[in-house]
Amino acid sequence: MTLQIPKPKTISRNAQLTKADRRFARVMTAAAFFSLVVLSLIAIFLVYQAVPAIRDQGLIQFLTDARWDSGSIGERDSDFVEPIFGIAAMLWGTILIGIIAIILALPISLGLATFIVFIASEKIAGVARAIVDFLAAIPSIVYALWAISALTLKGREWGEWLTTNLGFIPIFKNDIGIWVGTPLIAGIVLAAMITPIITSVTREVLSRTPAELVSASLALGGTLWPTLKYVAFPFAKSGIVAATMLGLGRALGETVAVFYVLNLTYGTINWVGIVSPQGGSIASLIVAKFSEAGALEISALLGGGMVLFVITLIVNAIATAISRLAITDK
Amino acid sequence: MNRTVTASKPWKQRTSNDYLLVIATSTLPMLVSYVALKSGILSPMLAGLLFIVSQIVAGGVAGLIHRGKRGVGDGILVSLIGFSLATIGIIMGSVLWSVLYKGLEALKFQFLIQNNEYITPTSPLGYGGIGHALLGTIIIVSIATLISLPIGIATAVYITEVRGRSKVIVQSLVQAMSGVPSVVAGLFIYATFIISGVSAYNGFMGALAYSILMLPTVARTAEEVLRLVPDDLRSAALALGASRARVVSMVVLPTAKAGLVTATLLGIARVIGETAPLVFTIFGSARTNLNPFSDGMAALPLYIFNGVRQPFAPEQARAYSAALVLLILVLIVFSLARFLTSDRKRK
C-alpha cells in the first residue's frame, strides 16, 4: 500500500486567505490572462483591418482565387484593371513547403533524438543537446543568408538532376528550365530550421520512456531496434506527433528565410511541382508586397496574415491537444 | 567456443573482429562511392546515392554478421542515425561557414561603431557600419524585455504558485501564443497602432512586436524553473506565517533567480534575430536614433534584411558581417543562459 500524501490546497480555493493573498492571486491571474488578451486582440484587429479587402473581394474568392493583382489605372478606360486579391496560390504554397520541410526534418530529428537518448554517452549527448539548442537559436535571417549563398547553388543542381532523371514523375516536372526559387529549396531551409525544434521535443519525450521498460526489453534480448520499435516509439508516439506539429507551425509562419529563396507565382496554383520555380508563401507575400501596397492591398495582406494566424493557431492547438492527451493517458 | 564468464560486462566485450567490422562498414561504402566518382563511372549525384544506399546495406550486413538476423535492424538503424548526425553537422558547418566566410571581410572595429549615414550601397568597406543598428537592437530588445519579463514571470507564478482553476487554460494559451508567427506579430502591431495613426513607425512599436514573441518563451521557461523550487521551502515559509505573496516574492523567486535570468536570456535569444516583426514596425534608419518613441530606428536584423537585397558587393559584405555580429550576439546570450543553467544544476 502506498502512502497517500494530501495535495496542497490551491490559493483560490482556500478559504483561509488573507486579503493580501487574494489581491496577489488576482494580480497574477490578470497577468496570466494577458496572453489571452493579446491573442484575441490579434484576431480582432487583423479581422477588422482585413474587412475592407474581404468585403471588396468576397471571402470565398479571397480564399480560393490564385490571382494577386493590385490593378492599374491607365490613361484610357480600357487600361483600367480591377484589383484582384486571392491567396489560394500562396496558401497552398505555404502548406506545400511546410510538408516538404516536415518530410525532410522528421527522419533526421528522430535519428538525432534517438542518438542523444539511447546511444550517446552522457558527455556526447550533452554536447549534441547543446548543438541542437544552439541551432534552434540561430536567427532565421542567418539561415536566410545561408540559403542565398550556399543552399541555392546546391538546390539548383539537385532540382535539375531530379527533373532530368525523374522528370516523368509529376512532382519533379519543371517546364520552365530554371531551378532557382523552387519549393524544394524553401522546404530544405525550413527543414534545417525546424529540425532542432522537432529534435529537442522528441528527445524530451523519448527520454521520458520508463527506464524499467527499456531494461525489460533489453533483458528479453531486444536490441536497439526492437526496443525502439516496441517500447520507445509507441510510448513517445503522441509526443513525436506533437513535436512535428510544432515544427510545422513554425515552418508555416517562417518569413525571411523563405522570402529570399522562393519565387512567388500568382495566377496559377503549383500543386505538386516541388522543383519548379513557382511557389507561394503567405508570409513572404506579405513582406514582398507590403512596401508598395495601397490601402486596399494592405487590407488584403492583413487578411492573409489573419489566415496564416488561424492556420498556425490550429496546428499548434492540435499539437497541444495531442501532448495533453499523451500526458493524461499515463 | 568456450568463453569464461567474467565480471566485466561480457556484452560489452569487443574482439578485434568486431573492430574490423566497424571499420570496414564505415569506410568501404565511402571508398567505393569515391572511386566510382573519381573514375567517372558515376555522376556526383549518383555517387552520393550509391554511398547512401551502400552504407545502409553495409550497416545491415554488419549487423547480420555480428548478431545474426536480429542484428540487421540495428545495423541499418545505426547507419541512418549516422546520416542524420552527418546531415545536421553539415548544415551547422555550412551555415556557420557561409556567414563567417562572407562576413569577415567587412568586420572591422569601425564597422561596429559607425553608423550608416552618408553611406551608399556602393561605398567602400572602410566606411560605415552597424553601430546604429546595434544600439537600435539593444534598445528594442531591452524595452521588449521590460514588457514581457514581468508578465511572463507573473504567468509562471500563476501556473506554479497560485495554481488557479484555469491553470491548464493559461498553459494552453501560452502555448498558442508561442506559435504566433513573427510576421503576424509585426502585422498585428502595424494594424493596431500604425495604420490607425496611433503611432508612427518607431522603435517602441518594434519592441511591442518583439514582446509578443518573447512572452511565451519567458513564461514557459520561468514556469519550468519555478517548478524546480523545492516545496519544502514554500511549506517552511508558510509555516513561519508568511503570506502567499511573501512566499513568492521572498522565497520562491529569489531561489529561482538564476533560472529566471536564464528565462530572460532565452527570451532575448528568441527575438534578437527576428526580422519580420521589424519590417512592419520600425521603418529602419541610417542615422543613430536613440529615441524609441520618435522616428525610424535601425536594428541588426532589418539592416541585414535590407542589405542583402542590394545587388552591390560592398553592401552585401556589410550585410553578412552584420549577420556574423548578430550570430555572435546570439551565441553570447545563449552561452550565458546555458552557463547559468549548468551552474544551477551543480548546486
Image: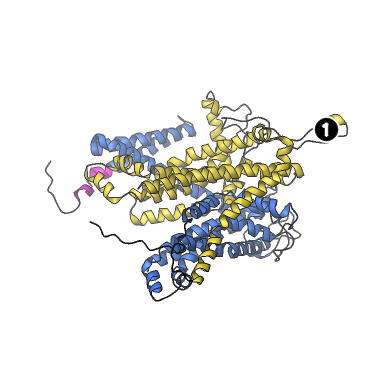
Measured from the top left, where is residue B147 in percent x and y?
Answer: 60, 63
Relative image position of residue B9 (x, y in whole percent): 20, 51
Colour setup of the view = by chain
In the drawing, does residue B159 fall left or right of residue B64?
A: right
Report the residue marked by disc 1. A80
x and y percent of residue B55 in the render? 37, 37
Q: Quadrant of the N terminus of chain A?
A: bottom left
Q: Which chain hosts label 1?
A: A
Q: Which residue is nearer to you in this view: B89 or A80?
A: A80
Determine which quarter of the picture holds residue A271.
Answer: top right
Judge left or right: residue A242 versus residue A291: left
In this rendering, position of residue A304 left or right of residue B250: right
Residue type at tag 1: Phe
In the image, what residue occupies the spot 54% across and 46% down?
Answer: A250
On the image, the x and y values in percent for residue A313 come to 55, 45
Magenta residues, start to end? B3-20
- Determine the colour of chain B: blue
Rendered view: A225 above or below A140: above
